[in-house]
């Protein structure tokens, strides 16, 4: 496992660099005309021209304008959001990603470990209770992304296969559930537990799917089909970080490679599951890596058509090993955030929806990104442990009234949507207070109303308590 202290920032050199034979002017003309962009075009736009060292503010505005016009032409003026809950099952993980502060070393969770830690593992019954409680508030999407707990297996057959290895802890990152203070159950058991009523379960990243088939010859499609039968409805295309292996070698050498990420996504879609795709940028990568990543996503969408939205995630650096050990000195600038969203809109001509993340950016900047090509504003998110533990400062919850106020303030139309974008409800700003209506137990009542005895909702109870 690589430690951030072993990475010399001065020694990080990449073969992929932002150099092109294209000009900014030609790339911008192609973007305005709606032509399919090349990687070189994308590099020129995301840098505002490789003929200049820094971002040119006037050129940047031209790129943002082109992206906003493309957004209006593709999806109109609606800004969508969902009523959702994050239920992360466990922070136990041995992968050692250097950009992450969500994890806790799995050894700390063992029954005989005398190690203090701030992490958690939930049983399937505890996960179900969290979802049951949130359903009463009107949510209709549960997002679940967890650490790679060594006792996690797809099902009981998988447990038997993993137990059969000589030294399974080293060979396949496996220890049996009885070695731990809390048994997380199997992936199938967790999916079944969280699939309550008609809630939409959005879970099992490509990395988790790899963990659910490690040590076997099972393919990704078979794994996702079993998970779908247990209640999984769609798969998040996270664990993507930067889909260029020379970057992954630095920030997450223990994670799956680009080809495996793509194979997992293809397996999920072959199993009938819609997916999302993400990028996590603003660390050691350069502008060319970001556009190469977009090319991987666009090619995948050309082949499958199963990606519902693209989610740019700006690196939150404060509490991460990359920052603590001086490998990076910060994250992306606000201008880089704007250009990332804009170029994603212009480059991904086969993905309709681009998300702006208030969790990463805050409300003010998140709204700005909606004028840079984005058209989705995430969800209510009753808990967001991953960003918070990395140092995020923008909270874990937004109400429907928050959304309506913010979206109408920029002249756009607030729309409640389902995870797959198939169900939509335009919201009348003048007909408040506002609450979800698409969930199995939703009736338009504002989320959390009266739960603190004041009638205004108060602070949400974190899903991880």
Image (cartoon, grey):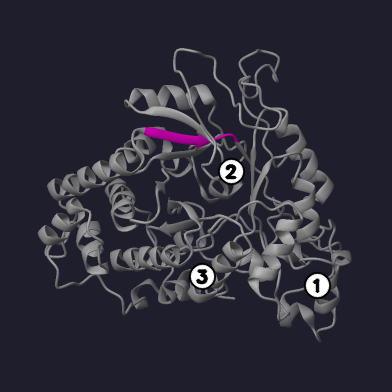
User: Where does the C terminus fall, quadrant-wise?
Assistant: top right
* Residue 74 falls left or right of residue 28: right
For the point 32% across and 51% down, the residue is 345
Q: Which residue is mark 3?
A: 262
For the point 75% across and 46% down, the residue is 194
Q: How far, Cα to Cα, is label 2 from label 1?
A: 30 Å
Instruction: State yes or no: residue 52 in magenta.
Output: no
Q: Residues within 10 Å of mark 3 (few under 14, many from 20)?
A: many
User: Where does the N terminus fall, quadrant-wise?
Assistant: bottom right
For the point 56% across and 34% down, the residue is 380
Confirm or deny contact between disc 2 and disc 3 (CB under 8 A). Answer: no
> Between residues 333 and 357, which one lies in front from this camera angle?
357
Visible residue check, residue 372: no
Q: Which residue is mark 2?
A: 384
Tell me which segment is drawn in magenta. Answer: 78-83
Q: Residues within 10 Å of mark 2 (few under 14, many from 20)?
A: many
Number of numbered labels in the structure image: 3
For this orientation, the residue located farthest to the bottom is 166
Q: Which numbered disc, 3 or 1, marks the residue that appears first in the sequence?
A: 1
Q: Which residue is mark 1?
A: 158
Query: Foreground mark, 2 or 1?
Result: 1
Q: Secondary structure at mark 3?
A: helix
């Amino acid at each position: 496992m690589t430690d951030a202290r072993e990475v010399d920032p001065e020694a990080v050199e990449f073969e992929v660099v932002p150099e092109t034979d294209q000009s900014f002017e030609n790339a911008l003309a192609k973007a305005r005309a709606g032509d399919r962009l090349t990687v070189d075009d994308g590099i020129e736009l995301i840098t505002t021209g490789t003929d200049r060292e820094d971002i040119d503010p006037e050129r940047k505005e031209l790129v943002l304008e082109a992206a906003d016009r493309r957004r209006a032409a593709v999806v109109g003026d609606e800004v969508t959001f969902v009523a959702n809950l994050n239920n992360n099952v466990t922070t136990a993980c041995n992968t050692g990603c250097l950009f992450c502060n969500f994890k806790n070393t799995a050894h700390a969770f063992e029954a005989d470990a005398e190690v203090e830690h701030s992490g958690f593992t939930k049983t399937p019954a505890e996960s179900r209770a969290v979802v049951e409680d949130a359903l009463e508030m009107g949510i209709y999407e549960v997002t679940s992304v967890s650490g790679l707990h060594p006792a996690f297996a797809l099902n009981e057959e998988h447990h038997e296969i993993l137990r059969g290895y000589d030294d399974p802890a080293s060979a396949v990152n496996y220890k049996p559930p009885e070695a731990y203070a809390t048994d997380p159950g199997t992936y199938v058991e967790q999916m079944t537990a969280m699939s309550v009523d008609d809630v939409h379960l959005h879970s099992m990243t490509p990395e988790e799917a790899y963990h659910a088939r490690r040590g076997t010859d099972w393919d990704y499609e078979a794994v996702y089909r079993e998970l779908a039968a247990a209640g999984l409805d769609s798969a998040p295309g996270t664990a993507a970080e930067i889909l260029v292996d020379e970057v992954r070698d630095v920030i997450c050498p223990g994670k799956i490679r680009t080809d495996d990420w793509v194979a997992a996504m293809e397996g999920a879609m072959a199993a009938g599951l819609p997916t999302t795709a993400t990028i996590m940028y603003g660390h050691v990568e350069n502008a060319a890596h970001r556009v190469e990543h977009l090319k991987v996503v666009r090619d995948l969408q050309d082949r499958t058509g199963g990606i519902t939205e693209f989610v740019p995630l700006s690196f939150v650096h404060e509490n991460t090993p990359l920052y603590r050990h001086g490998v990076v000195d910060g994250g992306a600038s606000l201008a880089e955030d704007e250009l990332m969203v804009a170029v994603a809109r212009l480059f991904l001509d086969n993905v309709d929806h681009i998300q702006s993340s208030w969790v990463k950016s805050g409300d003010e900047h998140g709204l700005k990104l909606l004028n840079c090509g984005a058209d989705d504003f995430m969800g209510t998110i009753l808990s967001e442990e991953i960003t918070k533990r990395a140092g995020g400062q923008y909270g874990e919850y937004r109400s429907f009234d928050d959304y309506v106020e913010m979206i109408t303030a920029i002249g756009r139309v607030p729309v409640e949507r389902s995870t797959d974008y198939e169900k939509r409800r335009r919201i009348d700003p003048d007909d408040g207070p506002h609450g979800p209506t698409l969930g199995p137990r939703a009736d338009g009542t504002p989320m959390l109303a009266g739960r603190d005895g004041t009638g205004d909702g108060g602070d949400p109870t974190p899903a991880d308590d």
